[in-house]
Image: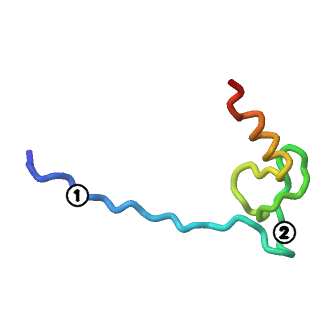
Amino acid sequence: MSSEPYCDVPVPVLASVDWTAAPGEPVAECTLCREPTEYKAQIPGTPLCPRCEWQEAQRTACSG
């Protein structure tokens, strides 16, 4: 058994991606109400419109 420490494995740096759609670019629709969002059409996950994002934040906020 070797007493050398393990090699440091470089962690890839993920590029910062801007998912906000530019004017005139196709946008994704909200997964809850089907209204247009401010995000690009090819955004991964479940995009929400600003209203549904706010309502979701209200539901998940601490209600202690």
Three-letter amino acid code at the position of disc 1: Cys
Residue identified by numbered label 1 = 7
Q: Which of 24 and 63 is in front in this view?
A: 63
Protein image colouring:
rainbow
Q: Determine the residue located farthest toward the front in the rendered image.
A: 64
Label 2 CA crowd tier, 10 Å (few <14, some 14–19, many 20+): some
Q: Nearer the viewer, residue 3 or 58?
A: 58
Give the quadrant of residue 15: bottom right
Answer above or below: position of 12 versus 2. below
Q: Which residue is drawn at 90% across and 46% down?
A: 33
Label 1 CA crowd tier, 10 Å (few <14, some 14–19, many 20+): few
Instruction: Find numbered disc 2 in the image and state the secondary structure of the residue it sits on.
Output: loop
x and y percentages locating residue 51 in the rendered image: 86, 48
Q: Residue at x 84, y 58 (%)?
A: 37
Asked if labels 2 and 1 touch by Cβ distance under 8 angstroms, the answer is no
Three-letter amino acid code at the position of disc 2: Pro
Q: Residue at x 68, y 31 (%)?
A: 62
Instruction: Find numbered disc 1 in the image and state the secondary structure of the residue it sits on.
Output: loop
In this picture, residue 16 sits left or right of residue 7:
right
* Badge 1 or badge 2: first in the primary sequence: 1
Could you tell me which quadrant the N terminus lies in?
A: top left
Give the quadrant of residue 16: bottom right
Give the quadrant of residue 26: bottom right
Residue identified by numbered label 2 = 26
Could you tell me which quadrant the C terminus lies in?
A: top right
Q: Determine the residue located farthest toward the top in the rendered image.
A: 64
Residues under labels 1 and 2: Cα distance?
45 Å
Q: Which mark is residue 33?
A: none
